[in-house]
Image (spheres, rainbow, N blue to C red):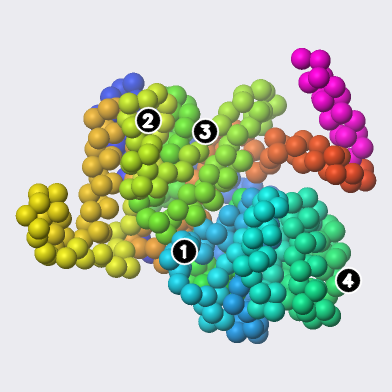
Amino acid sequence: MHIQFDERNLLAEMVGKQNGVTRAEIGRAGSKALKALKSFRKQSEQGLYGFPHLPFQAKVVQDIRKYASEVRGSYDTVCVIGIGGSALGAWALDCGIRGPHPVQGAFTPEHPRLVILDNVDPSFTQAALRSMDPRRTQVVVIAKSGGTAETVATFLIVHEWLEQSLGRKTAGRIVAVTTEGKGDLFSLAQSQRYRTFAIPENIGGRFSVLSPVGLVPAALIGIDITRLMRGAAEMTHLCWQPSLEENIALHAALCHWLVWTRRGKSIQVAFPYSNHLWGTAFWFRQLWAESLGKAHNRAGAMVHTGQTPVAALGTTDQHSQVQLYIEGPNDKVFSFWAVNKFSSTGRIPRRRFGQPAFDALAGQSLAKLIDAERRATAAAMVEYGRPNCTVTLDRVDEIHLGAFLQMMEFQTAFMGELLDINAFDQEGVELGKKFTYGLMGRKGFEKYRRQFTAYERKRKTV
């Protein structure tokens, strides 16, 4: 496993003192970074936050692999029902290892497709059902709380769709991933005899990709989850090292914290130069936004902190966003994600047509071109004083993707420590959920229905 972090284009020597940080600033902040490492490790070892321990839970991986082996060949579609962290991790893994749709090819029992129902748009849901055969579909319903409105509503529709074709065999087509012993989904799974896998209570949704939340769908579509966890375990070892040279997650967190808090770069653009990492960019967007967008610090002081994450795809978004990035407000930092070795070089034929634009590329490769595009974009940003850094994966396979996902989770946790906030709660999401429950008539949420009614009365007077 080989992943590198290159911070040089974040430095003042490259992008100017107004926009970049100095080596001296990084050096002075080194002790703060080590304090963040020590603080997070203590909390992890106390059992408060569990994602660092996931790569070492061999029994869980073994049980998931065994289950996937037992049912393999009986389905050509895996339908995941979940939202947020219960869906984005599975998409990141599928997109990363097998490639984005529609380039995965025809789906078969040997090569099942992944369909993710992560929204309650009724047209989308019905179109998804029409595209699947209930007799050849394996359903994975995921909800840590067991009562997420979007997930429950969609599951009720999918369950009826299955039951109409399978009758009493419906339960055998459903696996539930939820908190063991708690919540309505767990109770339903027990009564209906669904196969279940547990989400550890100290694992939040956005940190759950390497728990059964991501591993069950991954194993069902044929991803080697043992190699995935091997890469994550290697990265975990590096992320506990007190050296910034070895600990790239801590190094990256420190540099991003400095350029954000010292130079006012309140937006971070995750810019993968690989379609295989496109799903990971959206997974990262949730991880960074929900973890770092907080009203209060740990002392209870009002801080309203947060760095807005944006996903861009290289080279596609050079032609849709880079104009803004280079000539617009200088309030962003750019994180390029590069790949050293693609699965194919994309050889460009040698034939020449006598046209300069065509002949200049003849005989070269798409791999060389995408690398040149990334390096050229980084250089152009430097010319305009736009700080950027690069994370380079040797290749996109299970080992490197597992390591990269774990690196980004550690980086997020370290950033939370540097900001002195709780990166693992999400109070800002909860009120909207409670209003929704009230509006949909869920028992126990009458207070929020009344509060929402008062809000609507106020709107009518404006």
On residue 307, the disc is: 3
Please indicate whether residue 378 sits to the left or right of residue 410 in the image: left
Q: Is residue 446 above or below residue 351?
A: above
Residue 152: x, y in percent?
78, 56
User: What's the residue type where badge 4 is placed?
Assistant: Ser
Cα distance between the residues tagged 3 and 4: 44 Å
Between label 3 and label 2, give the one nearer the viewer: 2
Cα distance between the residues tagged 2 and 1: 29 Å
Q: Secondary structure at mark 3?
A: loop
Q: Is residue 431 above or below residue 158?
A: above
Q: Secondary structure at mark 4?
A: helix
Please, which residue is most extreme toward the top here?
A: 462
* Residue found at x 61% / y 82%: 72
* Residue found at x 76% / y 72%: 162
The residue under label 4 is 191
440 or 215, nearer to the observer:
440
Between label 4 and label 2, give the one nearer the viewer: 2
The span shown in magenta is 445-462
Mark 4 packing: few (<14 Cα in 10 Å), some, or many (20+)?
A: few
Instruction: Mark 2 or mark 1: name the one nearer the start of the chain.
Output: 1
On residue 102, the disc is: 1
